[in-house]
Image: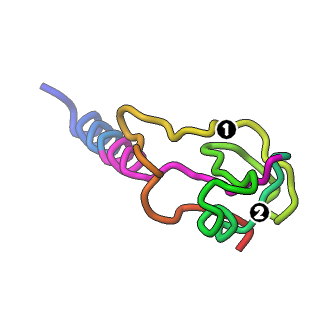
Amino acid sequence: MRKPREVRLTILAAVALSMTSCRTQHRDCVDAQGHLQPDSACQAGGGTGGYHYVYGGSSGGHVGDYVLGGSTTPRGGFGGIGGDGGGDDSAGGE
């Protein structure tokens, strides 16, 4: 039989895991050189002009900052999102 403390920790871990798995993945709109742009540039351009989303990268959060790392495709699998990334989770400098 488990101790009450172990049960509480198990429940806490399950809740934390379920909360993190439901989040959408962070995305940033960048230009062809990888500099952060307003999200509207990617939405209006529809991929033209070199504007595209980078998923999971990091930057200073200001328009013009270079976005490091990330991928041009959203993460799939458990806790991931597919398609165009759904919703607007972008910092995008706006």
Residue furthest toward the front? Answer: 48
Badge 2 element: strand
Residue 47 to residue 73: above or below = below
Which residue carries the number 1 mark? 70
Badge 1 element: loop
Residue 56 to residue 76: above or below = below
Crowd class of label 1 (few under 14; some 14 to 19; many from 20; radius 10 Å): some
Crowd class of label 2 (few under 14; some 14 to 19; many from 20; radius 10 Å): many
Which residue shows up at 60% across the image and 45% down it?
55
Which residue shows up at 42% across the image and 34% down it?
76
Which of pointers 1 and 2 lies earlier in the amino acid sequence?
Answer: 2
Q: Amino acid at mark 2?
A: Gln
Location of residue 83 in the rendering, given as x and y in whole percent from the top left corner: 41, 46
Location of residue 77 in the rendering, given as x and y in whole percent from the top left corner: 37, 32
Residue 90 to residue 32: above or below = below
- Label drawn at residue 37: 2
Image quadrant occupied by the C terminus: bottom right
What's the magenta region? 15-32
**With 60 as the anchor, is 18 left or right in this view?**
left
